[in-house]
Amino acid sequence: MTLFVALIAFVVGAGLVGWLATRGYLQTLLEAEGAQPETVATAPAPVVTPAPPAQLSQFATVEGRLAMIEDRMSRIDLQTNAAAGNAGRAEGLLIAFAARRMVDRGEPLGHVADQLRLRFMNAQPRAVQTVVDFAANPVTIDGLSARLEALSPDLTTNTANQSLWERTRREIRSLFVVRRDSAALANPTARIERARLMLTARRMDSAIGEVQRLPGAAAADTWIADARRYEAVQKALDLLETTAMLEPNKLQDSTGQAVDQPSPLAPAAPTPEPESEPAPEATEGA
C-alpha cells in the first residue's frame, strides 16, 4: 500500500514538472531563484557613524571643570590678598587712632607702643620714636592751658632787671593809660588770651608765637618747649595715620608681614602716553 502511494506521488510530480516545462514556467522559476543570491550580495551596506567613546566625553568634561575651578581659585586668591591688605591697613589706622587718644589724655601707651613698633617702625621709625618718647613724659592741652594761666603774671611784665622805683612807676602809670585799638591788640593780657584760644583750637604754632612776643617770655621757656613737643607728636601721629592709609611697601600687619596690597585710597598711576613716531624727512625733489 505504501509503495503504491509513493508511486502515485512520483507520477503526479513528474507530470507537474513536464507540464511546467511545456508552458515555459520552469525556466522562469530557475532564473529567478539563481538571481536572488546575486541581488543580496550586491546590495549596499548601510553606513553607520561611530559614536565618540564615553570615556573621552567624560575626560573633556572633567578637564573643563578643573579649568573653571582653577580660574575661580585664582580670583579667590586675589580677593583674599586684597581683603588681607585692607584689613592690615585698617588695623594700623586703628592703632594710630588709639595712640592719639592716649596721647591727648596723657596716658601711657602700654601695648599700643609695641603695636606701633611692629606695624610702623619699618616705614616711619622717627615718628614712632617721637610718639613713644612723648608718652613717657606726656603733656596735655589742659595742662598747657593751666600752666599758661599760672605764668601770666610773669609773662605780662619783665621785672628781671628793674629797680624798685621803676617797678613802682610802671604800676602807677598802668593805672591811668588810654590805649588805642591797635595798642590793645599788643597788650600782654590780650596776647595771653589769644594764646589760650589758640591752645583750645590746637593751633600750637600760633599759641607759641603769642607767648614769645610777651615781655616776660623768658619765664615760659619750659612751657614753650613742652608746647613744641606736643606739636611734634601731633605731626608724628598725622604721619602714622597717612602711612596706614597710603604706604605702598613698608607697612606691616599684626604678624610682621609686609602689606603688599595697594591702598584703595592711593591715586592711580598715570598712563604713559605712547611716543609719537618722528615725521619722515622730506626727500629732495619730492
Image (tube, rainbow, N blue to C red):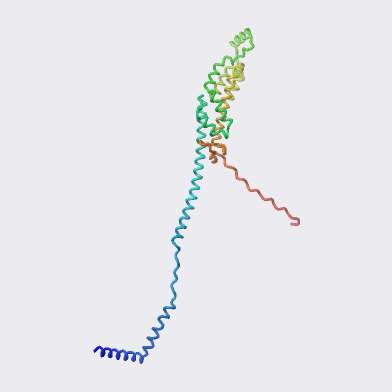
Residue at 44% across, 60% down: 55
Residue that appears at 44% across and 65% down: 51
Instruction: Classify 97 as above or below 180.
Output: below
- Observer-nearest of 196 and 58: 58
Instruction: Give 99 or 178, whichever is nearer the viewer.
Output: 99
Measured from the top left, where is residue 114 in percent x and y? 52, 31
Closer to us: 189 or 234: 234
Look at the image and tell me in which quarter the N terminus lies.
Answer: bottom left
Q: Quadrant of the C terminus?
A: bottom right
Q: Residue furthest top?
A: 165
Q: Which corner quadrant of the image does residue 248 belong to?
A: top right
Residue 75: x and y in percent read 50, 47
Q: Is residue 26 visible?
A: yes
For the question of whether residue 89 can be seen, the reply is: no
Say if 149 sits above or below 245 in the image: above
Quarter of the rendering containing residue 20: bottom left
Residue 127 in percent (x, y) is at 57, 30
x and y, in percent, of residue 242 in the image = 55, 34
